[in-house]
Image (cartoon, grey):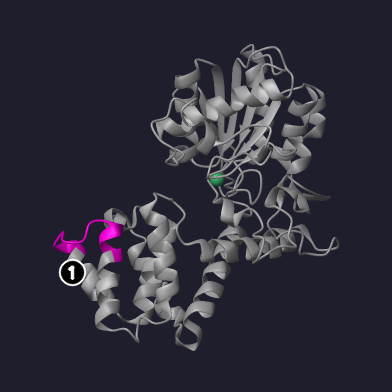
Amino acid sequence: MYENFGRASLADICDDWVIFRNLEPVDKRVPGLKQSFYDMELRSEQIPRKQDRDYAKAAVWFVNKIQQVRGVRTPVGELLFLGDTLFNDGQAFINMIDVSGWRGACFIGAERLDQAPATHVEQATISIANRWSALVDWLHSLKALGFQLDANTAVVIDIDKTAIGAKGRNDKVIDRARLAGIYRTMNAVLGDDFDQTRYEEHYNELNRARYHLLTADNQDYLAYICMVLNTGIISIDEIVREVESKSLDNFEQFIRWVDSRMMINPTAGEFLREVHEAVNGSVRIGDPTPFKRFRRQEFISTMEHMGNMPDTASVQELLENEITITEEVYQLALWLKERQCEILCLSDKPDEASRPHARVSPDLAPLHRAQTHRVGVDVRAALRNE
Ligand SMILES: [Mg+2]
C-alpha cells in the first residue's frame, strides 16, 4: 500500500517558512524571538517550550507576520495543525486557538497497522488517527464544517515524525540518527574510554519519569549526565541515592556537583572539561539546547539518513533506513498551498540539529532543503475530488 514517489524536500511545501526551537525563522523577512519578544507580549527572550502558552503567543505572532510578508491582505482566520503528539502538538494548537481566537482543527497522526483504521476526536477540534492517510477524511470533514481552506487559512506542520519520519511508520530512523550523533560525540570526547553499553544502561534508567526533576525531560541534559557517568567521576548509585533523598532535584545542581568532583579529581575530568564549560555556559543563559556539540553531530547523522538509499530500494528498505517525507502530509500540504493557504513548518527540533554549522558541517544543506524519498499512501485521487 505504501509507494515511493521519488525525491523531494520539505521546502517544496513550505519554502523557507520554517521555524525551529530557537524561534528564529529561517526566512529572515520575519524577525525572531530575540528581536521581537516584546512585540509578541512575552516577558523575556527566554525560549518557551512547545506546550507553553508563551510558545503559542510567539507562534500566532509568526503566522500573522508571514501573512503580511507574503502580501495577503485577508487576516488569518483559520488554523490547521498537523502533528504526532497530543501532549506537545495538541497543546500548542489549543493554546494558539486560545491566544488568537481563530477557528481551528488539529490532526494528530500515528500509524498503527495492527489496529483497524480509526479516528477519534478530542475536545471537539483534535482528531487522533491511527492512519496518516486519514488526513483526507479529516480534510473532507473540515469542508463539511465550513472551513474555507484558502488564503485566510494557516497550516502549521510539525517536522519530526510528522512531515518526515512518520510516527509509527518511519520514526525509528529519526531516533537512530540522534543516537548515532550521541555516540559520535561520546567517542570524540571520551575516546577509547567510552563504554556504550554502560551509557545505554544509564540512559534507560535516567530517561524515566522519576528523574524528571533532575533531567527536566531534556535530551541535552540526559546526554550530558550519561557522559559524566561514563567518566566515572560520579556513579549512577550516587545519583539514584541523591534523587531518592531529594537532595538532588535540578540540573544546575548536578553541574555544580560535577564542578566540585572535577576539582577533587582533575585528571578523571580532563576530557570532560571543555564540554562541561560549554554546557554550563549555555545553561546559565537559559538555553534549552546546551549540549551543542552533540546536536551538531546529530545534524550530520540526520543528514546521512536523508536521501541515502538508492532510488531502486524497496519501500520497506526506505522506511527502515532513511528518514522519508510523509507522502500523505506532502500531498495534503501541496493541495492546501495551491489554494493559497499559508504553510509553516514549526518544529521543536533544535536549530543545531537542523541547520549546518559554519565550521562543523559547512557543506550540508539545512534539513528542510535536504532531498529524500517521499513514501506513503497516494491520496491524490481523493484530494482531486475535494
Ligand atoms: Mg513531532
Residue 271 relative to residue 163: left or right: left
Does 84 appear in magenta? no
Amino acid, disc 1? Arg
In the image, the segment drawn in magenta is: 243-255
Residue 53 relative to residue 210: left or right: right
Query: At 75% across and 53% down in the image, what residue appears?
Result: 370
Query: Where is residue 381 shown, x and y percent of the image?
Result: 82, 31
What residue occupies the far front of the structure in this picture? 35
- CA neighbours of label 1 inside 10 A, class few (<14), some (14 to 19), many (20+): few
Query: Where is residue 139 shown, x and y percent of the image?
Result: 67, 25
The answer as to whether callout 1 falls within 8 Å of ligand 1 is no
Query: At 66% across and 48% down in the image, what residue appears?
Result: 164
Query: At 63% across and 48% down in the image, what residue appears?
Result: 166
Which quarter holds ligand 1?
top right
Query: Residue 309's quadrant in the figure?
Result: bottom right
Query: Where is residue 2 shown, x and y percent of the image?
Result: 75, 49
Query: Do we see residue 1 in this rendering?
Result: no
Residue beneath label 1, please? 241
Quick check: 266 above or below 331?
below
In what quadrant of the picture does the C terminus appear? Answer: top right
Give whichever of 20, 3 is nearer the camera.
Answer: 20
Query: Do we see residue 108 in this rendering?
Result: yes
Query: Where is residue 294 shown, x and y percent of the image?
Result: 52, 65
| Secondary structure of residue under mark 1 | helix
Give whichever of 269, 214 is nearer the camera.
Answer: 269
